[in-house]
Amino acid sequence: MPLFRNIHHNQEFFTEPQRFDPSRFEVAPKPNTFMPFGSGAHAGPGNELAKLEMLVLIHHLVSKFRWEVVGSNSGVQYGPFPVPLRGLPARLWKESTA
């Protein structure tokens, strides 16, 4: 079974793979180089629903709320998947409609 982190952080497939750059996906990546939901027999059965739910959540967070990271926002831990060090505490507040 492949380690997707190694594929996603390979400089042959993605320039500056450590940098957050959503625009890199404006052009479809090469086949089998970006697999956030697995691949083949190991693909998650609900991956399309999960993508839709994430888009809806992000839409509401961006359009209806303001937020900021609380405390230090640096550091990533791998075990084996990347997650923010000490979680990612954030403060959210509803955007006023005035």
Image: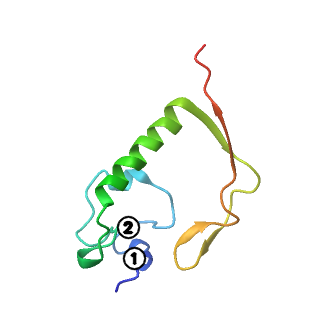
Which residue is the extreme one toward the right?
71
Does 27 sit left or right of 69 as displayed?
A: left
- Residue found at x 41% / y 82%: 3
Horizontal arrangement in the rendering, residue 61 relative to residue 66 (left or right): left
Q: Residue furthest top?
A: 98
Vertical position of residue 11 compared to residue 46: above or below: below
Quarter placement of the C terminus: top right
At label 2, the amino acid type is: Phe
Which residue in the structure is indicated by mark 1? 4
Q: Image check: 64 left or right of 75?
A: left
Residue 68 in the image: state x and y as whole percent.
67, 43
Three-letter amino acid code at the position of disc 1: Phe
Upstream in the sequence, badge 2 or badge 1?
Answer: 1
Determine whether 68 is above or below 95 in the image: below
Label 2: how many Cα within 10 Å (few below 14, some 14–19, many 20+): some
| Pair 2/1: label in front | 1
Q: Is residue 68 above or below residue 65?
A: below
Q: Residue at point 34% right, 86% down?
A: 1
x%, y% of residue 22?
Answer: 42, 52
Image mark for residue 14 = 2
Observer-nearest of 29 and 3: 3
Mark 2, secondary structure of its residue: loop
Q: Do residues under tags 2 and 1 come within 8 Å of each other at their CB atoms?
A: no
Name the quadrant containing residue 93: top right
Residue 15 screen position, x and y as percent: 40, 66
What kind of element bears circle 1? helix
